[in-house]
Image (cartoon, rainbow, N blue to C red):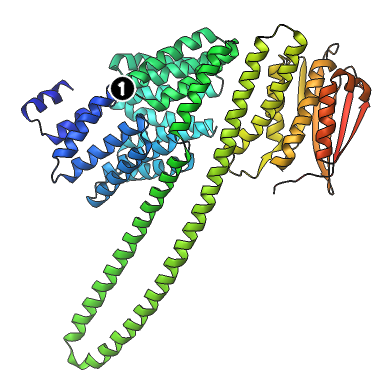
């Protein structure tokens, strides 16, 4: 950096030095990087390569600072420049940047698409170090999709080129991602080992961006190990680095992690304040407008690529026709035949243009229909996302209210209300994160609901366990909300009353469709309760079960047979195929 500054003292308009120094500043001082890049763009008159580099680097700065629309525009502009000047190396770099933007927007399919395009070019250029960088990014996608073995394979495969070339920055990034992968796999000793290796290198080279990410990952690790105070210390360190750098995306992620720790500690005042800040910041960074802009640019880019291919084909056809005409003109004997050939070509051309116009019209209509469907699905997901957020806020408020109550009965009532809200929030969370927003996977939902309730009531999993059999069933939201609330009440009753004198408790939940009827069973091997006892133990909950059962046209039977068994026979429900 000192050498670059010295060059700029002698040559203030040296575009290469301006771009190189700006890129170096992206790891330490984003505002300085932006100023240098804007200066380079302003004074650049005819150097297309350096203009593309300036715009791609500025896109990276905008992306880190949360200016998604501007970053997207700059990525596409740099891609177009590098395509025009046929700079494969820089085109691979720009594709990588576009992949990183989609990754930040949680669009992992598009992110993987651009990372693979980047890696293909780098493989063709026979550049092992750059291929390894693409492999690191692809490993990130596999982490997010919980394909941890694939992630470890790509990360270990990418390490050798960085070690051979003494690229300490990339070496530290690989160690950081290895630590993250092992942390996700709950292999905490291996995770700490790689995090420590990464920290040693990052401190040595002064990588503030990397340290900000590393300390958040260490906070997550100690949070998983239930060392909450140490987790908070690492989150505080992380926030100092990312806030100084101006990295809005990572600032939001660390804030959310902080909220979860405060909630686990029972510090509900700090938890509520941080959660509110997180929701506001996250909604400002990721919203429907950004997704609309991304879709619009993706369509525009794909259309330009198709138009370029068509233009090249037309040019080839025109060159072939010209060569043929020149050949025929040399022989007057074929003038008449040539005239007939021209007429025939014109006829074919007329048919071709007519067919092309029809095809373009159909393509435009298909694009409009596809975009309308995508917009509708995005809107539905956004609605489920906002409903889930609102229900989480309500759950947090109920949790705060319960913490302030002295009366145990009132506190239990508020916590039961909180569990009901969480059961509904879980449904909207599943719909928001699913590819198909029409319905909820019942097996996955009930497993998450049971785990949440067992954790909320502090049930010892070695003493009491649960099993669910609903594989292959997917229900629409109008069915799964009342059914989820009913099962929530039945699980809560079993946890509270059934297993007090039972050495090894077991809760079984099963759903099976027979003909046009859905059979639901919730059974425990506890002390056993009949319908009257169940009703007296939780009169409000039983009334709610009865009310919701009428909505599903369900018959309820309670049997005391080596524990309590509740049978529901539903005649009004809807499955999603």
Residue at 27 percent across and 91 percent down: it is: 337
| 348 sits left or right of 425 in the view | left
Residue 446 is situated, as x and y percent measured from the top left of the image, at: 72, 31
Residue 261 is situated, as x and y percent measured from the top left of the image, at: 55, 14
Quadrant in the rendering for residue 524? top right
| 425 sits left or right of 554 in the view | left
Q: How many labels does the image show?
A: 1
Residue 402, placed above or below residue 31? above
Q: In which quarter of the image is the N terminus?
A: top left
Which of 462/291 is in front?
A: 291
Outermost residue toward the top in this view = 406
Residue to which mark 1 is pinned: 168
Residue 524, placed above or below residue 39? above
Residue 543, placed above or below residue 122? above
Which of 355/397 is in front?
A: 397
Residue at 55 percent across and 15 percent down: it is: 271
Residue 66, placed above or below residue 69? above
């Amino acid at each position: 950096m000192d050498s670059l500054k010295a060059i700029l003292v002698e040559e203030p308009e040296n575009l290469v030095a301006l771009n190189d120094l700006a890129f170096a500043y992206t790891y330490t001082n984003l505002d300085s990087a932006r100023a240098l890049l804007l200066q380079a763009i302003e004074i650049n008159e005819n150097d297309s390569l350096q203009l593309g580099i300036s715009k791609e680097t500025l896109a990276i700065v905008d992306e880190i600072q949360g200016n998604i629309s501007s970053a997207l525009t700059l990525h596409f502009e740099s891609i177009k420049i590098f395509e025009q000047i046929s700079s494969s190396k820089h085109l691979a770099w720009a594709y990588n940047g576009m992949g990183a933007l989609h990754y930040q927007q949680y669009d992992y399919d598009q992110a993987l698409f651009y990372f693979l395009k980047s890696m293909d070019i780098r493989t063709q250029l026979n550049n092992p170090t750059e291929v390894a960088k693409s492999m690191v990014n692809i490993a990130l996608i596999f982490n997010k999709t919980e394909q941890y073995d694939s992630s470890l394979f790509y990360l270990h495969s990418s390490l050798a080129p960085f070690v051979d070339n003494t690229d300490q920055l990339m070496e530290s990034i690989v160690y950081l991602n290895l630590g993250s992968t092992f942390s996700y796999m709950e292999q905490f000793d291996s995770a700490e080992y790689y995090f420590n290796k990464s920290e040693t290198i990052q401190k040595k080279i002064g990588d503030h961006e990397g340290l900000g990410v590393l300390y958040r990952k260490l906070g997550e690790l100690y949070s998983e190990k239930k060392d909450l105070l140490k987790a908070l210390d690492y989150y505080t360190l992380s926030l100092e680095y990312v806030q100084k750098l101006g990295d809005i995306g990572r600032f939001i992620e660390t804030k959310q992690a902080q909220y979860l720790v405060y909630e686990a500690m029972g510090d509900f005042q700090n938890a509520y304040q941080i959660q509110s800040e997180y929701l506001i910041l996250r909604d400002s960074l990721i919203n429907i407008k950004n997704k609309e802009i991304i879709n619009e640019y993706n369509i525009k880019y794909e259309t330009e690529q198709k138009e370029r291919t068509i233009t090249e084909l037309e040019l080839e056809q025109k060159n072939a026709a010209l060569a043929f005409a020149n050949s025929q003109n040399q022989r007057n004997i074929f003038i008449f035949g040539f005239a007939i050939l021209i007429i025939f070509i014109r006829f074919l051309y007329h048919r071709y243009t007519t067919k092309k116009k029809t095809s373009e019209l159909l393509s435009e209509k298909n694009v409009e229909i596809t975009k309308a469907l995508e917009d509708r699905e995005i809107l539905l997901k956004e609605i489920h996302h906002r409903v889930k957020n609102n229900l989480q806020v309500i759950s947090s408020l109920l949790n705060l209210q319960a913490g302030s109550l002295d009366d145990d009965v009132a506190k239990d009532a508020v916590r039961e209300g909180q569990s009901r809200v969480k059961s509904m929030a879980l449904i909207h969370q599943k719909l928001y994160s699913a590819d198909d927003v029409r319905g909820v996977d019942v097996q996955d939902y009930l497993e998450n609901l049971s785990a949440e309730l067992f954790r909320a009531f502090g049930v010892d999993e070695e003493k009491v366990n649960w099993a669910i059999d609903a594989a292959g069933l997917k229900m629409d939201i109008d069915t799964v909300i009342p059914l989820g609330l009913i099962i929530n009440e039945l699980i809560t009753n079993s946890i509270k009353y059934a297993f007090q004198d039972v050495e090894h408790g077991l809760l079984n939940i099963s759903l099976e469709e027979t003909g046009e009827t859905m059979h639901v069973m919730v059974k425990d091997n506890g002390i056993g309760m009949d319908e009257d006892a169940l009703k007296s133990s939780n009169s409000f909950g039983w009334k709610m079960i009865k009310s919701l059962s009428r909505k599903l046209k369900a018959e309820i039977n309670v049997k005391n047979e080596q524990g309590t068994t509740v049978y529901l026979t539903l005649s009004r429900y809807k499955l999603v195929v």
